[in-house]
Amino acid sequence: MSIKENINSIKSELPEHVSLVAVSKTKSVSEIMEAYETGHRIFGENKVQEMTEKFEKMPKDIQWHMIGHVQRNKVKYMAEYVSLIHGVDSLKLLKEINKQAKRSQRTINCLLQIKIAEEESKFGLSAEDAKAILNSDSFKSFENIQICGLMGMATFTEDQAQIKREFQYLKTIFEEFKTFELPNYDIKTLSMGMSGDYELAIYCGSTMVRIGSSIFGARNYD
């Protein structure tokens, strides 16, 4: 099927409360435009430089989500336009996002990335570390960020029971974190689930799924 057919098919199956991030990393402007022309406006990238190049070339009503691991020295390049940063995994990174958002005279929405996978390679905070950030004096001083949810990535495995356990664990944390009353904080988004596991993620409570290969086909790694 074409990109247009793929994205329309997936969106027709998603519950109303679940938003779709079309993961466009490594894809060309023309391929992304094919998805854009269906009316879709949320696209996810994992490299700041690539996302910025696409932002400069493409329509300005696109919401660009940074879904990859973020290096602090790259925040300044996306601060003026990024719609949501998914992978916030340290207080130092939050501090830099706040600094660059202030410089750009805007507020940047962020998700705290919680480590739910057993793999050592996955980034993310423990629930305890995330609480420590939220309770810190530094966090309370940030005026140009908004924590609007949590994000997590399950272990890359065929074991559906394990993936389900990890998603359910994140949903439990999400429900606890929803009870916190803090400045710059209103969590409603639970970003979990990708092409291979998004249906299970939605079953476990996800409100935002990140789908790439099921829309655009395999990655273009030259």
Image (cartoon, rainbow, N blue to C red):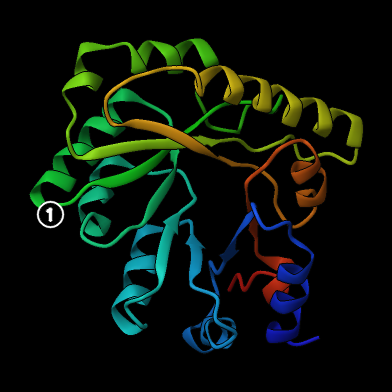
Residue 214 in the image, given as x and y percentages of width and height:
75, 68
Residue 180 in the image, given as x and y percentages of width and height:
43, 17
Number of numbered discs overlaid on the protein picture:
1
Decide if residue 36 is on the left or right side of residue 3: left
Decide if residue 119 is on the left or right side of residue 199: left
Residue toward you, 83 or 44 = 83
Residue toward you, 102 or 156 = 102
Q: Residue shown at 26%/38% (left/top)?
A: 145
Residue 109 in the image, given as x and y percentages of width and height:
34, 45
Is residue 145 in sight in this rendering? yes
Check disc 1 and report the residue beneath it: 104
Q: Residue shown at 19%/29% (left/top)?
A: 142
Q: Is the residue marked by circle 1 packed among few (<14), some (14-19), or many (20+) residues within 10 Å? A: some
Residue 43 versus residue 77 in the image, above or below? below
Residue toward you, 210 or 122 = 210
Quarter occupied by residue 166 = top right
Q: Residue shown at 51%/24% (left/top)?
A: 178
Tag 1: amino acid: Ser
Residue 75 versus residue 111 in the image, above or below? below
Decide if residue 102 is on the left or right side of residue 175: left
Residue 78 versus residue 107 in the image, above or below? below
Q: Quadrant of the C terminus?
A: bottom right
Quarter occupied by residue 221 = bottom right
Label 1 sits on a secondary structure element that is: loop
